[in-house]
Amino acid sequence: METIFDVENFNLWYGDNHALHNINMKIEKNAITALIGPSGCGKSTFIKTLNRMNDLIPSVKLSGSIRYRGQEIVNSDINVYNLRKEVGMVFQKPNPFPMSVYDNIAYGPRTHGIKNKSQLNDIVEKSLRDAAIFDELKDRLKDSALGLSGGQQQRLCIARALAVKPDVLLMDEPTSALDPISTSKIEELVLDLKKEYSIVIVTHNMQQAVRISDYTAFFLLGDLVEFDKTDKIFSKPSDKRTEDYITGRFG
Amino acid sequence: MNLSDKSNKDSVETIASTIFLILGVINIGFVLLICVYLIIAGLPAIVKIGPIDFLFGTKWASTAADPKFGILPFILTSIYGTAGAIIIGLPLGFFSAVYLAKIASKKVRYVVEPLIDLLAGIPSVVYGFIGMLVLVPSIRTLFGLPDGASLFAAIIVLAVMILPSIIKVSITALEAVPQEYELGSLALGANEIETYYRVIVPAAKSGIAAAVVLGVGRAIGEAMAVMMVAGNAANMPSLFESVRFLTTAVASEMSYSSGLQREALFSIALVLFVFIMMINATLNVLLKRGGVKRK
Amino acid sequence: MSDNAKPSLQQKSLPFGRSLYSHALQSCMLLCIGITVALVFFLILYILIRAIPYFSWEILTTKPSYLRGTIGVLPDILNTIYLVFTALVIVLPLGVGAAIYLNEYAKSQKLVKVIEYAVETLAGIPSIIYGLVGMLFFCQFLSLQTSLLAGSLTLVIMSIPVIIRTTQESLKTVPNGYREGAFGLGSARWHMIRTVVLPCCIDGIVTGCILAAGRMLGESAALLFTAGFAHALHGYIDGITSSGATLTVALYVYAKEQGEFEVAFVIAAILLVLCFITNYLAQAYGRHMKKIKQ
């Protein structure tokens, strides 16, 4: 298997607060990697460094190395806009822009310079199809995205992320604000997307990690306690703390 | 209230609630008072002159032997003047607001916002005075005019005067846009500027429209500053000529007016009032839609 | 753009179109904020620099005399103080009372909507119209003549919205628990308002007063036909019953009608300083109160 993110001795501070300690992991291409752990363990912070969204918080300091396809992204002078184009992100709370469904999807491609109408139409249709929401929305492309249900909004956001043709999709608890039916639709979709994309997903829900992920990383208080194949983590974890967490002793 | 109404010993409560009811309702009375007075004072002259001649007459000669009372020049001047002020003030205020709301550091905002407040608080006569001493002569020399007191001078003064309200209302509107939109756009690889102008600004458009309408209301109702720089001749509007606005038409002749002339001045005020009412109605709709509180 | 032509992370600059767009907007913003700030500084410096040479103890403490050919702004300062004081004393109970009605007493939402709409309408009416109606109603109908009192009453109606709005805002911040607590102890409504609610929103009322005073200090169009132009020196009682120019009206008359620019600059500088002080007080007081509440 090919590695897409290679994390070595990575540390992160919020001001004086040492939030992530010496993280080492290799994230595989075309696989689903789940990040689990109790609230405040650093998993969301970690996922945001993969597309440098942490740049927006001025007090954040980083050390160590994360290489995306061999290119150093920690403290390096890369083009973050291109990085974020290649490493897309879906947020916890669905955040469609207050514009039409069509304009939401076309926003990314337009930003990256695609003006041609028929090309945009193709991208919008393909992205919606890939996000398995085209049939539901094909007659509502001109309607405001804010009128959709929560589950539809989240799939729209996934489609919006796919429209800029990323390699990686980062998903920060994408189903935590959704009902069970919408959640299972998103899970199916994520499994389907694995063929073309590498996916890193933060989740609170351990069943979800078991259902969809190939690899699981367990974070606790800023440490990466254990990182392995999902089957292994949930059947015979090698660390006592992992076992305690997945058997529900804390968290 | 029901309980205290029923208790016979506590008449204080009954009196208090009655007084407060009166104090609340009296505000409706004030508005009615203003409406009724303007209509009573303003309508007769419109009827006497004839609504068409009054509103669309192009000549105002109130003190001539054969007086003419056409206020089209004033209406058009007010509209052009306000439009001009918006054309200059809106971009200036809009870009300043985006800068302050989104880019400026806390320190910069801490220094600049009081300055904007100061701009909002400077009395209109002071604007008129500075306009008279600085702007009018500059326009005269710059454009080689016999007199710089003109529609153009009034437009600049009005633009400066509406600037603070445009900036402040726009900032409130921009800050009311949820941060998730910003993150969503950045995560797609848009840079900060693209994010501000292609997501945040469109999301705040109702509030920004409200800022514009508020500015229109201020500009169309301003009298003193305009009176000091516009020259006050009852010409049809032209950028570099002396002009008279609806407001200044009322103010400049009121002190020596009598008879039909005086009645006609009240009619002008009535026309101005109708304009303002329409603007306020628009403003209320926009403010509700934009979810922005009026300051 | 084909699927596999990925933009490199090493390619530092954005494509030409995007970087042009960003730089153009960035420059636009810097230019506009620069102009705005420069404008404020120009106004402040211009007024102060031109006014300072004419400032003297004499000009501040005398009245103009055609006999001696001297000029002074003391009557205008006093008139302004009388006017603002009178208007505040009247508008305060009216505005606070209306706000209390809207927030604490009103049962019918319809009536509240109508009153709030009326208040918003009052806030949007230009001052020249207040001036006209004030002239017709206070000066003529109530035969107060052109006097500071008529001017004050006109300003009262003008500034009611400011007081109502700030009072209402701070009434809304008083937690409902306080009210329920007082009711639970058997307090009647007015008693509860007087002892529990009002003390909590003094800050809003004070801020409202400062803002209203600021507006009154700067008002001129509404006073032209109601308060008059005289520069006579009076005590309070004589003052409010006779015609008198406030600082703003005096500035207008000196600058526009008489061409007395020296005294006009002095008045402009005084008004600027007053505006600065009221803004500062309103802000500082607001911040102070926020701190105390936390």
Image: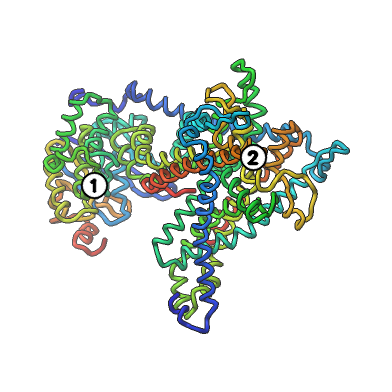
Chain containing mark 1: A
Most foreground residue, C292 or A251: C292
Bin the neighbour count of mark 1 within 10 Å (Cα to Cα): few under 14, some 14-19, many 20 and up: few
Q: Position of residue A26 (x, y in %)?
A: 22, 40
Disc 2 versus disc 1: distance between alpha carbons?
61 Å
Q: How is the image coloured?
A: rainbow
Of the numbered discs in the image, which one, if any, rests on residue B158?
none
Helix, strand or loop at label 2? It is loop
Q: Is residue A51 left or right of residue B146?
A: left
Q: Position of residue C48 (x, y in %)?
A: 70, 35
Most foreground residue, A177 or B154: B154
**Residue named by callout 1:** A147
**Residue named by callout 2:** B258
Q: Is residue C220 left or right of residue B210?
A: right
Amino acid type for the residue under numbered disc 2? Ser
Amino acid type for the residue under numbered disc 1? Gly
- Residue at 37%, 25% (x, y): give it: C21
